[in-house]
Image (spheres, rainbow, N blue to C red):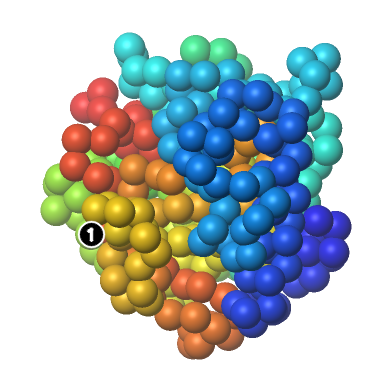
Amino acid sequence: MNELLALPPFSLPQREKARRLAERLAQLTAFHCQACPPYRRMVEAQGKEAVAPQSSEQIPFIPASLFKHMDLLSVPPEQIVKTLTSSGTQGQRVSTIYLDRETAIAQQRSLVNIVSDFIGRARLPLLIIDSPDVLTNRRLFSARGAGILGFSLFGRDRTFALTPQMMPDWQAIDAFLRRHHGRPVLLFGFTFILWRHFYQPLLQRKQRVDLSCATLIHGGGWKKLSEAAVSAEAFSDALRQLCGLSRIHDYYGMVEQTGSLYLQCASGHLHASLCSDIIMRRHQDFSPCETGEPGLIQVVSALPRSYPGHSLLTEDRGVILGIDDCPCGRKGNYFRVLGRVKDAEIRGCSDTYAAAF
């Protein structure tokens, strides 16, 4: 595990990465089978052997949604230092993820490695496109709050762009941009919130803001914007035209595998780091898809030790676009998310918030 975290996150060709990752995943499967009886029973029900897999595709997987219905732990409860919950609309079940110190540290190291590969190691002034209430109001704190805290690692002079009423705090925004005029800054937010509560009010404002030196990282689901016929390309074009923002990185990730983030490069591709990977499966029989063939997204991660979340089948659809040959130079699988499976629950931080509108 430590040797994977010590390497640049996109430095190994897929073949070598897959070999190392499969070894780690087999170790985790054996560990969780021994430490978590409910997980062991699920693996046995699949007719799988804990130590037999030779590739990531052969590692047993469980549905990501299972964490909404079961408390799955592989360490004693007294070792838990942090509990994360997924986003969920009122009345929806949420996933609950339990982290021990080792897992929490590994996830943080992985997140730092991945994001630093895109924005550099220096901590940048950070404008958070959200309300501070997300961190202070326990009713609102979930994966959304955890995401803000996670990305706060990369920022200094952290400033919230929205009021508790989810209106732009123009005084705070303008002061932040004056302090850092002409220098690189980082923006972070969830896609729908950014569009509805930042971009649209900015469109109506007579005074423009200059974000030509900014880098934006955003994520959390596209369902609501897709319904409004706002594509990823239209989203980026709108921000570029309105405020000169050209460095925009979407990401794919989930609370069930915090730290295993898939960030979008300048070519528009999502990338899998050394500590995680993506597998597409056919919905008819769950067999692996070929490159270029759409399927259900399975995510694997070398990080989860306190809970059996290292191999999960999601309710999302995607397609692997290529291997080792992205124009950005990053090695490994790169892919695109195509959307949710029909009738699947809304799950992204952005989509969960958007469900109220």
How many callouts does the rendering have? 1
Residue 200 is at least partly visible in this image: no
Whether residue 54 is situated above or below residue 10 in the rendered picture: above
Q: Is residue 269 above or below residue 95?
A: below
Location of residue 201 in the rendering, given as x and y in whole percent from the top left corner: 29, 42
Task: Please give left or right for residue 286 compared with residue 261 in the image.
Answer: left
Q: Which residue does the image show at 80% across and 19% down from the upper left? A: 76
In the picture, measured across the screen, residue 308 lies left or right of residue 317, that is: right
SS at badge 1: loop
Q: Nearer the viewer, residue 116 or 292?
A: 292
In front: 98, or 223? 98
Q: Residue furthest front?
A: 47
Q: Residue 115: x, y in percent?
A: 65, 60
User: Residue at the location (62% across, 32% down)?
Assistant: 40
Please name the residue shown 26% across and 35% down the image.
Answer: 344
Q: Residue 97 placed where, x, y %?
A: 61, 27
The answer to whether 3 appears left or right of 300 in the picture is right
What residue would you read off at disc 1?
Answer: 231
Q: Residues within 10 Å of mark 1 (few under 14, many from 20)?
A: few
Q: Is residue 25 visible?
A: yes
Query: Where, quadrant-wise, is the N terminus in this rendering?
Result: bottom right
In which quadrant of the rendered image does the C terminus lie?
Answer: top left
User: From the viewer's perspective, is residue 35 above or below residue 263?
Assistant: above
Q: Residue at x 32, y 76 (%)?
A: 292
Q: Nearer the viewer, residue 346 or 15?
A: 15
Residue 238: quarter of image: bottom left
- The residue closer to the viewer here, 93 or 239, is 93
Residue 198 lies in quadrant = top left
- Residue 190 sits in which quadrant? top left
> Which kind of residue does numbered mark 1 sit on?
Ser
- Residue 88 in the image: x percent, y percent? 39, 24
